[in-house]
Image: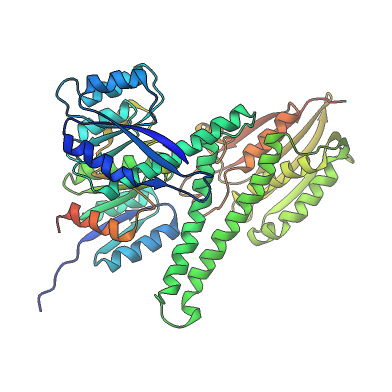
Amino acid sequence: MGKLNLLVVDDEPGIRSGIKRILESFSVSYPFMDEDFDFEVLEAETGEEAIELLDNYLFDIVLLDNKLPGIQGIEVLEYINKQAIDVIVVMITSYASLDMAVKATKSGAYDFVPKPFTPKELRNCLENIAKQLFLRRMTQKMQVEGKQIRFQFLSVLSHELKSPINAVEGYLNLMKDKRNGDQIDDYKEMIDRSLTRIDEMRNLILDLLDFTKIESGKKSRNIKPVDLCEIAGRCIDLVQPLCIQKDIDIHLNCNDKVSFKSDVQEMEIIFNNLLSNAVKYNQQGGRIDINLTKERGNTIIAVTDTGIGMEQGDIEKLFEDFVRIKSEQTKHISGTGLGLSIVKKIADLYSASILVDSEPGQGSTFTIKFPENE
Amino acid sequence: MLKIEKKKILLVDDDQDYLFQLSIAIQDMGFDVATATTQKEAEDIIEKLKPDLAILDLMMENQDTGFILCHIIKNKYPDVPIIIASAVTAETGLLFDVDSEENRQWIKADLFLDKGIRMDQLHKEINKLLKI
């Protein structure tokens, strides 16, 4: 059982003992946590007392009232920041004092518990924090073990995975309640949406597998001369059905063979991602050009589409994990936000550069330039 | 018979499935709903009607679309209570994901809720804000 040390700072003895009582028999458990957390509560009556305790003991969480007899809660918060004390601060406050809430947020408060609060509200808040602390500890442990998995990545990932599960669960509950009547046909739309969300989730998991393999460096690589023309041809076959649906012409331009020393799978991943983007973000009746060239020892892959294009500012964000450019035009296009960051990771393995040339409403060209690697 | 005017709630979320399910739940609570999946759609709606309350997702087109909408609504209808519902709080540990000082000054929402909130809890919070 893990213990979280919690400091309650409040001048009202009733609140302090109330919190102590609420947390006495409370522990947090999750299926993915290998241990439960419970809480060890220490009390401080004033901000000054709190600072003294913070200087001398390690706490995980501080529950901080703002209105205190001496220095105010917000000043304690500022002290914690100034000393860079690693602790999660929850302000105990009322919704009414929004200005204070904004100020506290600026100073890094994690959450607010409204006053007066119910035991349930306090437990909910601490449950979230325990989960976050668990993830943080796990991340630290993994970093110590040399595993490069970032907390941010995990958290966004859990969000991306949770959304489709929530959506499907919501539809199943509506069906269970027979919301639309007794006929299965009445639920066609809900079923279709559920299947779509599951599809998206599968794609995410597949992308994720590629991603983590590359990221961890565990993927076995088989570097030998391969013909990029042939690989591109195979990848075109994969997107062909989508091209037919959208009436898109796809052209592969290469003279004979374009040989490049690389891993076939990695090149396939690059082509698949660039081509599926070129189709997804293209217009009805559009065109895609794949140009494969050799230039002074460099091997160059360029994929040009006649799609929606994007603003210069968006291009910079494009290769970050889970980033998708959201706009009126892209909101009905599904994607995982991992495709291009995977492409970037592979390109990095070859010290290749990626150039994006794009004009909103005209189209985009993605050019990957691989330096000589003989 | 006296017709009681239902309160209107504006829901904005870019997850169309969440939006659909939320709007059913809120209609079941006895409210009228208007829905939007983008900032622009939401702006068009508030041009035409004044909702009694708005529930906004935080991260839509941009990480802070919810805040921007919140700002716009509060400017036009200062008395309309706004709930910002987000999945990011618990996930990222970031309560408000805003990057600039000015943005922070905008935070005028009446309540921040985690998207995982149970519907009966949400109902309670809505009633509280609508003073029902």
Q: Among all residues in the image, which is located at the extreme bottom?
A: A182
Give left or right: position of A224 versus A128.
right
Give left or right: position of B82 versus A260.
left
Q: Nearer the viewer, residue A357 or A225?
A: A225
Q: Nearer the viewer, residue A280 or B10?
A: B10
Q: Among all residues in the image, which is located at the extreme left?
A: B2
Residue B49 is at least partly visible in this image = no
Query: Can you give x and y, in whole percent of width and height, for residue B48 in the image?
Result: 24, 55
Query: Can you give x and y, in whole percent of width and height, for residue A97 in the image?
Result: 18, 35
Q: Residue at x 80, y 51 (%)?
A: A234
* Quadrant location, the C terminus of chain A: top right
Q: Residue at x 65, y 47 (%)?
A: A207
Query: Can you give x and y, in whole percent of width and height, for residue A91 in the image?
Result: 27, 34
User: Does residue B15 sit above or below B71 in this rendering?
Assistant: below
Residue B53 is at least partly visible in this image = yes
Give left or right: position of B15 versus A359.
left
User: Does residue A31 sit above or below A298 in this rendering?
Assistant: below
Q: Residue at x 27, y 52 (%)?
A: B54
The colour scheme used here is rainbow
Q: How many marks?
A: 0
Query: Can you give x and y, in whole percent of width and height, for residue B74 in the image?
Result: 22, 43
Give left or right: position of A256 versus B60.
right
Q: Nearer the viewer, residue A180 or B92?
A: B92
